[in-house]
Amino acid sequence: MIILEKLGSRGGLTLTKSDKEMLLSQNEEEIKQNEERSTEILFALLRGFIHYAVDGEVFGPEKEIKEIYGNTLNENYPEANDLFLNFAKTYWTFKIALRNLFESFESSERWVGLGFLSEVEVAIASIFFHTPGPLKKSYREREKAQREILEGSGVKIDIDEFIAGNPILIREKLKPKSFFNKLFGGKM
């Protein structure tokens, strides 16, 4: 609940007693019954995450990133600037904290709030980091989405500098285009 409250607060939302009851519930029907409020909460959590990420705040020890994934962020993203590295350290420590939360509960004990945190993680991963499968975005889609989210969140950040030092975008931009992309002008 602490992570939910912190993200919500940074996203401009104070969770009410009713919100907390819904988030601690194990009944997912609560979301459907409170769809409008659930959407407000989710967007506040996303905004809150963006604020945390721009400031480079972490959700656990950074050393766990290397322990779990095998590399430091500097090793994974050597071309990254400090703005992106701050964002990445927040994301990866959040991902680890979320994983630890899920592992600490049996599936029958999981509460609605964990689902909200998972939605935040998936949304951030699909826009700012590589995701395999159907969530994969093209370079242009990813850059556009990143700009829109950063602008819409109201954070104080030089978006052009963030984009310029984002190794995910740098690598995707430099990737050779497939024969079909060249043939059809990048429309595939």
Image (tube, rainbow, N blue to C red):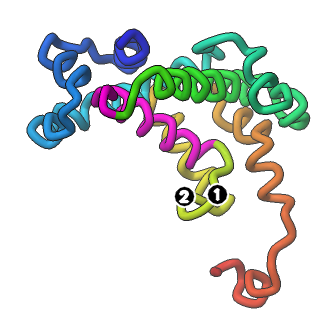
Q: Position of residue 169 (x, y in %)?
A: 74, 49
Q: Which residues are magenta?
A: 108-128
Q: Position of residue 159 (x, y in %)?
A: 64, 34
Q: Is residue 99 left or right of residue 14?
A: right
Rounded to the nearest whole Å, what is the CA distance between mark 2 and mark 1? 7 Å
Residue at image position (37%, 18%) is 4
Residue at image position (33%, 17%) is 12
Q: Position of residue 43 (x, y in %)?
A: 34, 33
Q: Is residue 23 left or right of residue 185?
A: left
Q: Secondary structure at mark 1?
A: loop
Q: Position of residue 121 (x, y in %)?
A: 51, 36
Q: Secondary structure at mark 2?
A: helix
Q: Are marks 2 and 1 in contact (CB under 8 Å)?
A: yes
Q: Amino acid at mark 2?
A: Leu
Q: Amino acid at mark 1?
A: Pro
Number of the label disc, if any, that sits on residue 135? 2
Q: Is residue 25 left or right of residue 42?
A: left
Q: Is residue 39 above or below residue 96?
A: below
Mark 2 residue crowding within 10 angstroms, few (<14) / some (14–19) / many (20+): few
Q: Work out whether residue 101 or residue 22 is closer to the camera in this orientation and state it.
A: 101
Residue at image position (63%, 21%) is 93
Q: Is residue 165 above or below residue 138?
A: above
30 falls in the magenta region: no
Most distant residue in the left direction: 33
Residue 155 visible in rendering = no
Number of the label disc, if any, that sits on residue 132? 1
Q: Quadrant of the N terminus?
A: top left
Residue at image position (48%, 43%) is 123
Residue 119 visible in rendering = yes
